[in-house]
Amino acid sequence: MKEYIIKRVHELYWKEDINCARTTLICLSELFEITIEPQTIWSAVALHGAGGYRAQCGLVEGALMFMGIYLHVLEKTEDEIVSACYNFAADFDRTFGSLRCFELRPTGFSKNDPPHMCEKLTCNGIEFAYQYILKIIKQ
């Protein structure tokens, strides 16, 4: 699973040049074998730190979007989904130190940043989300 995530993230970043939120949605949908509608993928086009504003991390946004879809498919109630998302955000914050893109990027932001500098963080964030979701569905 970890090798799959590393390979897939690299492919989505470097071959398709898509952002962290869409990468997260795609990877989680493939790992859990659930189809995500193209319109949903497009809804995440600007969810990389709120369109580059450097606010909430796209890894969090993509994972939350996926959890809303997947947990609904598993017939969880809205309250259960909201609670799972809240707990995910709290756990992500504790594990990674923030929910904000600006604080999570390895060197912050500058005009000379190389592309996809959050690739390792993306792999770690997707693996974290995957493990978190596995725990939820086993409850």
Image (cartoon, rainbow, N blue to C red):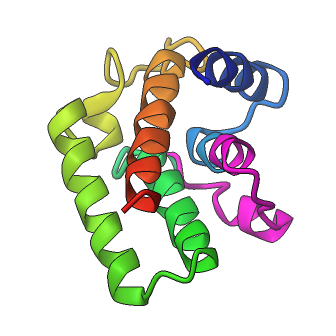
Is residue 58 visible in the rendered image? The answer is yes
In the visual, does 22 lie left or right of 71?
right
Which portion, as a residue range, is magenta?
26-49
Quadrant of the rendered image containing residue 100: top left
Name the spot of residue 99 as percent of width and height, x first: 27, 46
Name the spot of residue 131 as percent of width and height, x first: 43, 40
The single residue placed furthest to the front in the displayed view is 138
Q: Is 137 placed above or below 115 here?
A: below
Q: Is 98 placed above or below 37 here?
A: above
Residue 28 lies in magenta, yes or no? yes
The structure residue drawn at horizontal position 58% and vertical position 74%, both measured from the top left corner, is 74
The structure residue drawn at horizontal position 83% and vertical position 31%, both measured from the top left corner, is 16
The structure residue drawn at horizontal position 50% and vertical position 35%, both measured from the top left corner, is 126
In the visual, does 108 lie left or right of 35?
left
Name the spot of residue 90 as percent of width and height, x first: 19, 53
Quadrant housing the N terminus: top right
Name the spot of residue 116 as percent of width and height, x first: 59, 20
Residue sitting nearer the eye, 100 or 120: 120
Residue 67 lies in magenta, yes or no? no
Quadrant housing the C terminus: bottom left
Residue sitting nearer the eye, 39 or 50: 39
In the visual, does 5 lie left or right of 107?
right
Is residue 49 visible in the rendered image? The answer is no
